[in-house]
Image: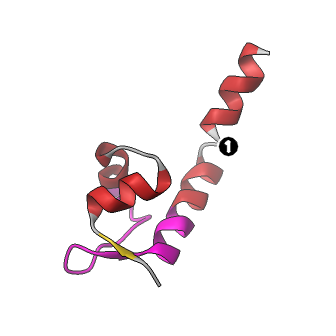
Amino acid sequence: MAIFDRQGAADRVGRNMRTIRRWEEKGLLTFVLGRVRESDLLAAERAARQNRGGDRRSARVTASA
Protein backbone atom coordinates (compact mmCIF):
# COMPACT_ATOMS: atom_id res chain seq x y z
CA MET A 1 0.00 0.00 0.00
CA ALA A 2 1.44 3.32 -1.09
CA ILE A 3 1.17 6.40 1.10
CA PHE A 4 1.59 9.96 -0.17
CA ASP A 5 2.04 13.45 1.16
CA ARG A 6 0.07 16.22 -0.57
CA GLN A 7 2.61 16.85 -3.31
CA GLY A 8 3.07 13.14 -3.92
CA ALA A 9 -0.70 12.71 -4.10
CA ALA A 10 -0.96 15.49 -6.67
CA ASP A 11 1.83 13.91 -8.72
CA ARG A 12 0.25 10.44 -8.48
CA VAL A 13 -3.08 11.52 -10.00
CA GLY A 14 -1.65 14.16 -12.33
CA ARG A 15 -3.34 17.10 -10.62
CA ASN A 16 -1.98 20.20 -8.95
CA MET A 17 -1.81 20.98 -5.23
CA ARG A 18 -4.78 23.35 -5.50
CA THR A 19 -6.96 20.45 -6.67
CA ILE A 20 -5.81 18.24 -3.80
CA ARG A 21 -6.61 20.98 -1.30
CA ARG A 22 -10.02 21.51 -2.94
CA TRP A 23 -10.76 17.79 -2.57
CA GLU A 24 -9.83 18.09 1.11
CA GLU A 25 -12.15 21.07 1.57
CA LYS A 26 -15.01 19.17 -0.09
CA GLY A 27 -14.40 16.17 2.16
CA LEU A 28 -13.41 13.87 -0.69
CA LEU A 29 -9.96 13.31 0.74
CA THR A 30 -8.66 13.13 4.29
CA PHE A 31 -5.00 13.37 5.23
CA VAL A 32 -3.89 11.87 8.52
CA LEU A 33 -0.64 13.29 9.86
CA GLY A 34 -0.07 14.81 6.41
CA ARG A 35 -0.40 11.49 4.59
CA VAL A 36 -3.06 9.71 2.53
CA ARG A 37 -3.37 6.12 1.31
CA GLU A 38 -3.29 5.51 -2.41
CA SER A 39 -6.65 3.72 -2.30
CA ASP A 40 -8.29 6.76 -0.67
CA LEU A 41 -6.65 9.07 -3.19
CA LEU A 42 -7.90 7.06 -6.15
CA ALA A 43 -11.40 6.88 -4.65
CA ALA A 44 -11.40 10.68 -4.27
CA GLU A 45 -10.32 11.06 -7.89
CA ARG A 46 -13.18 8.80 -9.06
CA ALA A 47 -15.68 10.71 -6.91
CA ALA A 48 -14.46 14.07 -8.22
CA ARG A 49 -14.71 12.83 -11.80
CA GLN A 50 -18.28 11.59 -11.23
CA ASN A 51 -19.27 14.86 -9.55
CA ARG A 52 -18.26 16.88 -12.58
CA GLY A 53 -19.78 14.46 -15.05
CA GLY A 54 -16.75 12.79 -16.60
CA ASP A 55 -13.07 13.09 -17.19
CA ARG A 56 -11.99 16.60 -18.15
CA ARG A 57 -9.27 15.28 -20.46
CA SER A 58 -11.71 13.17 -22.49
CA ALA A 59 -14.09 16.14 -22.71
CA ARG A 60 -11.35 18.22 -24.31
CA VAL A 61 -10.68 15.53 -26.89
CA THR A 62 -14.37 15.25 -27.70
CA ALA A 63 -14.80 19.03 -27.97
CA SER A 64 -11.88 19.42 -30.36
CA ALA A 65 -12.83 16.46 -32.57
Q: Quadrant of the C terminus?
A: top right
Residue beneath the point at 46% across and 67% down: 41
Quadrant assignment, res 46: bottom right
- Count every numbered label the image shows and give the total: 1
Relative depth, front residue between 49 and 57:
57
Viewer-nearest residue: 12 or 62? 12
Residue farthest toward the top in the current orientation of the protein:
64
Query: Which region is colored magenta?
Result: 23-44
Q: In which quarter of the view is residue 47 placed?
A: bottom right
Residue type at mark 1: give it: Gly
Q: Does 28 appear in magenta?
A: yes
Residue 50 in the image: state x and y as whole percent.
65, 52
In the rendered structure, the answer to whether residue 16 lies left or right of residue 32 reads right
Colour scheme used in the picture? secondary structure
Q: Position of residue 40 (x, y in %)?
A: 48, 74
Identify whether 9 is placed above or below 55: below
Q: Image height check: is 49 above or below 59?
A: below
Q: Is residue 10 above or below residue 60?
A: below
On the image, numbered disc 1 is attached to which residue?
53
User: In percent of the image, x 54 and y 66: which residue is there?
Assistant: 42
Residue 16 spot, x, y in % from top left: 35, 43
Compared across the picture, whether 13 is left or right of 7 comes to: right
In terms of secondary structure, where does tag 1 sit?
Answer: loop
Residue sitting at 40 percent across and 67 percent down?
A: 29
Q: Dot 1: few (<14), some (14–19), or many (≥20) neighbours within 10 Å?
A: few
